[in-house]
Amino acid sequence: MSETEQRQQLLHYAQQLNSSGLSLGKSGNISLRCEQGLLITPSAVAYDQLQPQDLVKIDYQGQAIGNNNYPPSSEWHFHAALYQQRPEHKAIVHAHPSYCTALACTQRNIPAFHYMVAIAGGSEIPLVPYALFGSEQLAQQILAGMQHYRACLLANHGMIACGENLSSAFALAIEVEALAQQYVLALSIGEVNYLTEQQIAAAIEQFKSYGKRD
């Protein structure tokens, strides 16, 4: 994919952050791994005002590559850190959807209440401890907290979803928010029945081949 195509694709998904309900206003950010580093949405610019040339290209130390119209998102630290530690990730969506954020603000993860939790790579969607947004501390806590997971909640903040491309990362973000909503509803009804370790392990194994064709 050429850089022009990458910019167009990233802009397409960035502009869906608001319409999908994943984020409101200028909150959240989205990135795509590219040659020499990453393309990321700029800081504090409304998505509907962006043009492909406004997306920011930086290296893993946050230094500009070429001429950029805006500074990168303040959250570039954890995007860069995840790309460096997790080579399988090619795209990252960070958002503040209502149900994920409600759980994160009450210090809750999303446990194995439903087999679809396994879509994020483990027996839960973990909660990463709070750190100031845009800080290196937050980046390091995300690396430690996500480990082999593809998604997490950020305490008093929001959520992150990663994927092998923008389509899969965005779809996972939507799925995590749906799971968060279902979990909040289940908690409001009464006692939640959680899957056993064996049951969720079987679901994790099943997802390894889910959707694949010979």
Image (cartoon, rainbow, N blue to C red):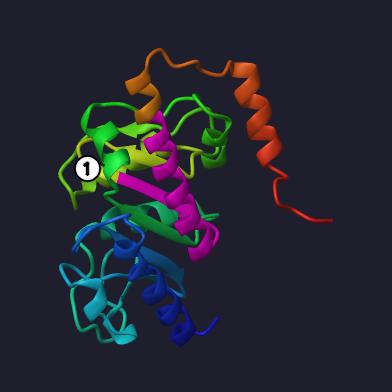
Q: Quadrant of residue 115?
A: top right
Residue 170 is inside the magenta segment = yes
What amino acid type should be assigned to the residue bearing mark 1?
Answer: His
Q: Quadrant of residue 119?
A: top right
Q: Position of residue 84 (x, y in %)?
A: 43, 55
Identify the residue at horizontal 29%, vertical 84% (top origin): 51
Instruction: Return the residue nearer the eye: 13 or 128.
Output: 13
Asked whether the viewer can see residue 169, the reply is yes
Instruction: Return the residue nearer the eye: 20 or 36.
Output: 20
Q: Position of residue 3 (x, y in %)?
A: 45, 83
Query: Left or right: where does residue 141 sit relative to residue 130?
Result: right
Q: Secondary structure at mark 1?
A: loop
Span of residues in magenta: 159-183
* Count of numbered badges drawn on the protein: 1
Q: Is residue 150 above or below residue 194?
A: below
Q: Residue furthest right?
A: 214
Instruction: Return the residue nearer the eye: 122 or 72.
Output: 122
Identify the residue at horizontal 17%, vertical 72% (top origin): 45
Q: Is residue 188 above or below residue 162?
A: above
Q: Position of residue 140 (x, y in %)?
A: 30, 42
Residue 2 is inside the magenta segment = no
| Quadrant for the N terminus in the image | bottom right
Asked whether the viewer can see residue 85, the reply is no
Residue under label 1, please give it.
157
Q: Position of residue 73 (x, y in %)?
A: 22, 64
Identify the residue at horizontal 37%, vertical 34% (top origin): 145
Main secondary structure along the magenta-highlighted residues: helix
Q: Is residue 77 above or below residue 144?
A: below
